[in-house]
Image (cartoon, rainbow, N blue to C red):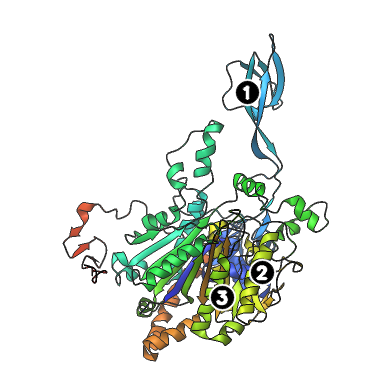
């Protein structure tokens, strides 16, 4: 009997803000919220962004004046709107007017001297021996060259791509703990994983009393590693700039580091760990690993996550060179504009509309999964369940970047699973799709064809399709996590985020069986039984996750465990919800801090108690059993 993986916690940080308790989702549908929820969302973002603080029972504005919560929220809302989601790249990330690049040049002197002037910042890091430099006092220098030399001059230029989905301006995760020059992606992972674990409402030490150390698993990674100056980015460019390579840049650049950090500095995990890589499908690959671990009984508690921070000039230029990103001139041409305003930058990503490329984004998202029996035993709140994740490659390809057939298999299997579990009516009338929806001309055609053909095959009319990248941009390997977080909010607030940045659906989009809403769609909190989260990744990496609603998860649990067990679970759940709400309140007020345990309870081999039946670890209530059964009994 397979255990059902249920979602008992979730958290993260994205351009929409903190993910836990649906705060990030609420930013997407801010105009649809009731007054209290809207106020809470704005205040939470305000404290996150450093625009307000909470002290001695009341809020303070940026000037340190005590102010009523409603009045403060009204004052902060314009800044919150303008400094979240997709927008023009802020100088905190880099100066779009002066992106550094190196210009090669050959300097040839005659028998006498070659004299020329430069801006002082254009001087190479190491001057050749045959150069003599004189400062002119105007930010310029005069250079005299004897002989000849080949040089690289640092220079700058205007960025061709100036829009991105960035974390809320003013939020710096590294300031909340001893980050010690960690790459930005790992800083985000520490914050996001802490947020997810705290959202469970059950102390981790309490959970561990019910588990053996090897019944925990962590599956987390990203698609391209840590590419800022503290990771692989600095490792590759510092020598050319005359800067010193550090001992941390190489190891902290690896793509599996989000899992390694969670194991070492948050959980102290000695159970299973791993980090799958699959381009845009990376998060869903890791989710599949977590689901399989719980279904097989190898793990009862799993953290699944991802963290990508690709808003750097180098990464943006790489994707731009591929023709994948929406350049400013192309965006202006779409709307017949001479120049882009701030509002135009916020509409840069237009899934399934007339578009010209995707918008880069950054995000870190984590899910906490439990086996169904452990969740009932602990009274954990259940936000949904993940019965399966399907992954398929594209087969033979002409170009590694070209689309293929694998996504038809993943989405088709997911639809078939919903039908087999919940029936034809549920699939046709009570399911929807959270699309990959990158906002490229190729994706709008190919993905819409995939979804439309699966809808046609299963006789689904008007299958609703949403695409959260319209708000957050494309966070690469973490994109599937963004899609899941935007989906879970439906079952709390009843609204599917619409394609609000898309003026109209493009003529080449396949939609005979689809509903592509251009506005938020109110459907109610229990009118959708499932969402199919789709990823259509570079290189032929396709995945679709089937996420089922909390009311469906409870129905399934009642059939397996009985009404009495569910009644007892609901009683225990109330206390768990109270504890979780306490954390939410602290986090909303800006008082919560991420968990980061450096040099904490470090164990060596000498600390273990080892027999031929079990291994006991100090600090863990239960041992690791060595009484293993022979899985090949018929062969041995």
Secondary structure of residue under mark 3: strand
Extreme residue toward the top, this view: 111
Measured in 3D between alpha carbons, the distance from the residue under mark 2 to the one under mark 1, in whole angstroms, is 52 Å
Query: Looking at the image, do the residues carrying marks 2 and 1 touch, with CB atoms under 8 Å apart?
Result: no
N-terminal of the pair, mark 3 or mark 1, is: 1
Can you give x and y, in whole percent of width and height, for residue 384 in the image?
A: 49, 77
Numbered marks: total: 3
Q: In this view, does 397 lie to the left or right of 31?
A: left
Quadrant where the image shows the C terminus: bottom left
Residue, disc 2: 448
Residue, disc 1: 150
N-terminal of the pair, mark 2 or mark 1, is: 1
Query: Which residue is depicted at the point 20% across and 52% down?
Result: 606
Answer few, some or many: residues within 10 Å of disc 1's Cα (few below 14, many 20 plus, some between 14 and 19).
Answer: few
Can you give x and y, in whole percent of width and height, for residue 214 in the image?
A: 30, 64
| Residue 260 showing in the rendered view | yes
Query: Which residue is depicted at the point 72% across and 20% down?
Result: 116
Answer few, some or many: residues within 10 Å of disc 3's Cα (few below 14, many 20 plus, some between 14 and 19).
Answer: many
Can you give x and y, in whole percent of width and height, for residue 298 in the image?
A: 33, 69
Can you give x and y, in whole percent of width and height, for residue 166 in the image?
A: 61, 56
Measured in 3D between alpha carbons, the distance from the residue under mark 3 to the one under mark 1, in whole angstroms, is 59 Å
**Relative depth, front residue between 538 and 474:** 538
Residue, disc 3: 531
Answer few, some or many: residues within 10 Å of disc 2's Cα (few below 14, many 20 plus, some between 14 and 19).
Answer: many
Secondary structure of residue under mark 1: strand
Q: In which quarter of the image is residue 343?
A: bottom right
Q: Which of marks 3 and 2 is in front?
A: 2
């Amino acid at each position: 009997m397979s255990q059902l993986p249920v979602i008992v916690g979730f958290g993260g940080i994205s351009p929409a803000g903190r993910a836990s308790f649906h705060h990030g989702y609420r930013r997407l549908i801010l105009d649809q919220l009731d007054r209290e929820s809207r106020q809470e969302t704005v205040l939470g973002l305000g404290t996150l962004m450093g625009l307000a603080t909470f002290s001695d029972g009341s809020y303070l504005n940026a000037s340190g004046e005590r102010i009523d919560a409603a009045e403060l929220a009204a004052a902060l809302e314009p800044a919150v709107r303008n400094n979240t989601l997709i927008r023009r790249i802020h100088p905190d990330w880099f100066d779009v007017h002066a992106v550094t690049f190196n210009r090669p040049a050959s300097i040839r002197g005659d028998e006498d001297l070659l004299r020329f002037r430069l801006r002082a910042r254009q001087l190479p890091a190491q001057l050749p021996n045959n150069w003599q430099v004189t400062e002119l006092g105007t930010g310029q220098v005069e250079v005299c060259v004897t002989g000849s030399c080949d040089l690289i001059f640092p220079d700058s230029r205007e960025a061709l791509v100036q829009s991105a989905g960035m974390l809320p301006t003013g939020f710096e995760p590294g300031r909340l703990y001893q980050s010690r020059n960690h790459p930005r992606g790992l800083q985000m992972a520490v914050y996001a994983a802490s947020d997810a674990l705290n959202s469970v409402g059950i102390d981790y030490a309490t959970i561990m009393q019910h588990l053996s150390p090897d019944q925990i698993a962590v599956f987390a990674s990203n698609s391209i590693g840590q590419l800022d100056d503290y990771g692989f980015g600095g490792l590759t460019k510092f020598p050319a700039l005359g800067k010193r390579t550090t001992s941390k840049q190489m190891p902290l650049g690896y793509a599996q580091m989000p899992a390694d950090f969670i194991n070492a500095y948050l959980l102290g995990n000695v159970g299973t760990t791993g980090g799958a890589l699959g381009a845009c499908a990376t998060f869903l690959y890791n989710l599949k690993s977590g689901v399989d671990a719980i279904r097989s009984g190898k793990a009862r508690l799993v953290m699944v996550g991802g963290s990508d921070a690709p808003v750097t000039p180098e990464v943006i230029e790489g994707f731009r060179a591929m023709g994948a990103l929406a350049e400013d001139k192309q965006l202006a041409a779409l709307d017949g504009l001479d120049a882009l305003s701030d509002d135009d930058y916020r509409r840069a990503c237009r899934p399934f509309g007339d578009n010209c490329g995707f918008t880069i984004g950054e995000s870190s998202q984590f899910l906490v999964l439990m086996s169904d029996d452990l969740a009932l035993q602990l009274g954990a709140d259940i936000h949904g369940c993940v019965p399966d994740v399907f992954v398929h490659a594209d087969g033979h390809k002409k170009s590694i970047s070209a689309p293929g057939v694998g996504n038809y298999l993943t989405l088709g299997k997911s639809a078939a699973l919903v039908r087999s579990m919940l029936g034809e009516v549920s699939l046709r009338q009570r399911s929807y799709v959270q699309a990959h929806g990158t906002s490229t001309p190729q994706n709008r055609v190919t993905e819409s064809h995939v979804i439309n053909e699966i809808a046609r095959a299963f006789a689904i009319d008007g299958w609703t399709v949403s695409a959260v990248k319209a708000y957050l941009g494309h966070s690469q390997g973490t994109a599937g996590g963004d899609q899941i977080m935007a989906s879970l909010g439906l079952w709390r607030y009843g609204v599917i985020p619409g394609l609000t940045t898309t003026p109209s659906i493009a003529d080449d989009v396949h939609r005979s069986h689809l509903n592509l809403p251009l506005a938020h769609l109110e459907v109610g909190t229990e009118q959708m039984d499932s969402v199919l989260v789709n990823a259509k990744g570079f290189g032929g990496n396709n995945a679709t996750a089937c996420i089922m609603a909390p009311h469906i998860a409870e129905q399934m649990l009642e059939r397996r465990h009985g009404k009495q067990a569910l009644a007892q679970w609901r009683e225990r759940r109330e206390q768990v919800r109270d504890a979780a709400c306490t954390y939410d309140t602290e986090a909303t007020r800006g008082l919560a801090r991420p968990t980061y345990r450096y040099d904490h309870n470090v164990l060596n081999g000498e600390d273990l108690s080892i027999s031929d039946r079990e291994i006991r670890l100090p600090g863990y209530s239960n041992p690791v059993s060595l009484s293993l059964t022979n899985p090949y009994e018929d062969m041995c």
